[in-house]
Image (cartoon, grey):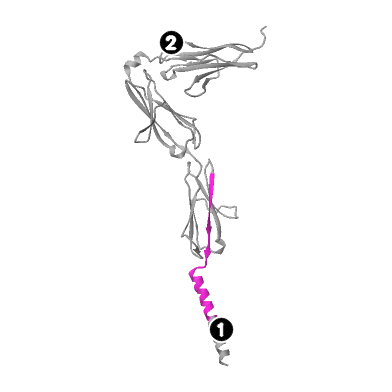
Amino acid sequence: MFSPDAPRTTVLSVTPSETVEGSSVTLTCSSDANPAAKYDIYRVNEGQHGQLLRTEIQSVFSSIQVSDTGRYYCTAGNDLGSQTSPSIDINVKLNVYLLFLSDAPKVPSVSISPSGDIMEGNSVTLTCSSDANPAANYTWYRGKDKKPMKSNKNLIFNSINSNDSGQYYCTATNTKGQNNSRVNVDVKYAPRSPSVSLSPSGDIMKGSSVTLTCSSDANPAANYSWYKEGEKAPKASEKSFTITNIQNEHNGNYYCKVQNKIGWHNATVTVNVVAGKLSLMYILIGTIPSILLIMIFLLVLISR
């Protein structure tokens, strides 16, 4: 009976030893361990930690490509410990038959990491890869003018923002020719601080109408809600909110809430209702006769 032991002499091997584009290639991780070890196989990425390929003892490339050229290693672990194998280099040779068919780089594949929605402020990497022999050189461009940005297969945004949204192009070039691909970058972000306005602006005459308008930049598009300060129920669920036949009870602060799945913002505007022209006229009509009566009464007293 073997005594329990952590993994030892962990090794990653490749079969067959000579790898040609389009052939089947198997990576196998082995180790002496008791109890039996669990295995992970990794690929070393440029400037990064290992990329996990498989959580099994073997990783099979059914049709290996030149882009699979690189350095690989594996880890073996059980309850008593773990061990990492020495790394091995795999150099995939271009299939001579394919070389006669096309001598330029193949159409590059372009990927975005991490996958899924691109959130503002996150680190994002665009990666371009193409099968070519000799190996291709890569250049990244942005927009229709295709202004060069970087000569590397990876284009890295350490803290991406909304201004980085747009079309990006990758060109793969070698001495035999070139090919290119494009990718769309759509950066998602919470609503910006909204702007609010009144139309007409300034004081609002009693009995007239006023429209409150709210606007904000957001991706995805934001939903809008209008509230009156001190009230829980929304007054409207649109960018614009109109009050007709405005009265004194409409006086007060109104705020607009702008929200999407990423975040929210709000802004406040004040509605100030004043007496309308007709109201002033009625006041004058009611006041003038009273003044005249007082004046007549005073004149009578003086004449005595």
Residue 234 versus residue 288 in the image, above or below: above
Three-letter amino acid code of the residue under disc 2: Glu
Res. 172 image quadrant: top left
Chain part drawn in magenta: 264-290
Q: Secondary structure at mark 1?
A: helix
Q: Is residue 43 above or below residue 241?
A: above
Q: Please give the label number shown on residue 294.
A: 1
Kind of residue sitting beneath label 1: Ile
- How far apart in space, not on screen, are marks 2 and 1 (Cα)? 118 Å
Residue pointed to by mark 2? 18
Q: Residue 72 versus residue 149: which sits nearer the camera?
A: 149
Please state if 50 lies on the left or on the right of 147 as rendered. right
Residue 167 drawn at (x, y percent): 40, 35
Q: Give the mark, 2 or 1, whose residue is nearer the N terminus.
A: 2
Q: Residue at x 35, y 13 (%)?
A: 96
The quarter of the rendered structure image containing the N terminus is: top right
Residue farthest to the bottom, as pictured: 304
Does the segment drawn in magenta span residue 152?
no
**On screen, residue 134 above or below 211:** above
At horizontal 53% and vertical 83% (from top left) the residue drawn is 292
